[in-house]
Image (tube, grey):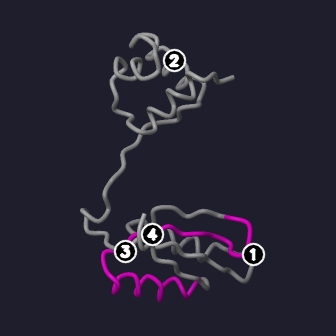
Amino acid sequence: MLDRTDLRILDELSKNSRITMKELGEKVHLTGQAAASRVAKLEESGVIEGYTIKVNQVKLGWFIHAFINIYIKTTYHEPYLSFIKTQDNYIINNFKISGDSCYILECKFPSHERLNQFLEDLNKHANYKLSIVINK
């Protein structure tokens, strides 16, 4: 069972996973060593699965951020899933969901032309509804 301090540690690490244990301890009112011990226990118990970075996609040339609802008329999704595996440069996440559609794709594209080509290729395997992110 997680206590308030554990939850505060998780909150601080989610904001900045590179924080030193000393700084983390100060933020949650523990010593650096006590904070490190708590973090190690959270890792060992599987609460913390890993650490990651946040990347500015626009600075890397990915100017279009889109969500695409995927509609497949049959229960055979393999052609779609095989296509998706070949498009990993553009796909951030592919979520299988319940609701109106079968999947939601989160994608990034360098240009409208590349997005259009992706959609034309996608349409060979599934119908879709496109939403482009305006602001985050």
N-term-proximal mark, 4 vs 2:
2
N-term-proximal mark, 1 vs 4:
1
N-term-proximal mark, 3 vs 2:
2
* Disc 1 residue crowd, few under 14, some 14–19, many 20+, Cα 10 Å: few
Q: Is residue 20 above or below residue 135?
A: above
Residue at 55% x, 87% y is 123
Give yes or no for contact between labels 4 and 3 (Cβ–Cβ under 8 Å).
no
As rendered, which of 56 and 5 lies closer to the eye?
A: 5
Gap between marks 4 and 2 measured at Cα:
36 Å
**Disc nearest the viewer among 4 and 3:** 3
* Disc 3 residue crowd, few under 14, some 14–19, many 20+, Cα 10 Å: some
Q: Which residue is identified by label 3?
A: 64
Q: Which mark is residue 107?
A: 4
Amino acid residing under circle 4: Cys
- Is label 1 in a helix, a strand or a loop? loop
Magenta stretch, residue numbers: 97-125
Residue 93 percent across, percent down from the top left: 51, 61
Gap between marks 1 and 4 measured at Cα:
24 Å
Gap between marks 1 and 2 measured at Cα:
46 Å
Magenta highlight on residue 128: no
* Disc 2 residue crowd, few under 14, some 14–19, many 20+, Cα 10 Å: some
Quarter of the image holding residue 64? bottom left
Quarter of the image holding residue 41? top right
Q: Which residue is identified by label 1?
A: 75
